[in-house]
Amino acid sequence: ADAPWANLMPYGSSPLVTASVLLIAALMIPSLGFLLQKAFSASLVFVISIAAFNLFLIDLDQSDKKESGKIDLAIIQGSVPRSGLLFNEQKMEVLKYHIKETDNLLESNEKNYDAILWPENSIDVDPFRNKEAGILIEDLVEKFEKPLISGAVVQKANGLSNSVLLWEPKDAKVIDSYDKNRLVPFGEYIPFRSLIGNYVNRFDLIPQDFIPGTRSNNLRVNNTLISPIICFEVA
């Protein structure tokens, strides 16, 4: 993330960054080859090209940098336990781990965070349908009086939704959300399920398709707009 190649992110996302890394690698190979052959002038041409490209990327970072403030997030990764044989028990354990780690951080740290951030699938039990899960989350939000931005799997009428939920501390309720627009084929849904499902038994592991969201939505946290793109959408 700190390398100069990351400055290409706003222009072409991860594919452009990957291409630039490959380009530099490709230039390094003949540079080393000429050096081993003691063709120093030819090798220097490639070294200068690599240096110039990196200087261009560094300069790119300075060309249009704007800063309007900052937001301090308490970022929690609650880990994935392997206890319990039942699938739903596993899901609840993941949620409880995130609650536990949030408690550990905020109770031992005097820093005044603006919001709490949990990752994708941190709430793998639909908090709107599972009363226990909903109460656990509401109690946490009320306890620390901080907004919670959380990844969640939500059961809707026509399928599952990979969502980001914004919990507001005043009433400990969800006030805004985003549903993942670009889903992972064969991971979150099966294309042509009725056609190929009869031939590939493994697709039974995904018994229900996720459904894509229909709109983009930025979440507003303390007058800061956060764009909650999820995993595959980054690319």
Image (cartoon, grey):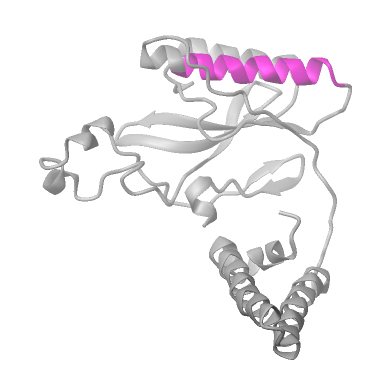
Q: Quadrant of residue 156?
A: top left
Q: Is residue 126 above or below residue 203?
A: above
Pick whichever, 172 or 30, lies toward us: 30
Horizontal side of residue 202 vs 126, given as left or right: left
Magenta segment main secondary structure: helix
Q: Where does residue 92 sit, x and y in percent of width and height?
A: 49, 15
Q: Is residue 55 magenta?
A: no
Q: Is residue 101 magenta?
A: yes
Q: Quadrant of residue 44?
A: bottom right
Pick whichever, 99 or 7, lies toward us: 7
Q: Is residue 223 above or below residue 42?
A: above
Q: Is residue 60 above or below residue 192?
A: below
Q: Where does residue 55 sit, x and y in percent of width and height?
A: 80, 75
Q: Residue furthest bottom?
A: 41
Question: Residue at left 51%, top 57%?
Answer: 235
Horizontal side of residue 231 vs 63, given as left or right: left
* Range of residues picked out in magenta: 91-109
Q: Where does residue 95 sit, x and y in percent of width and height?
A: 55, 19
Q: Which image quadrant: the N terminus? A: bottom right
Question: Residue at left 67%, top 28%?
Answer: 76
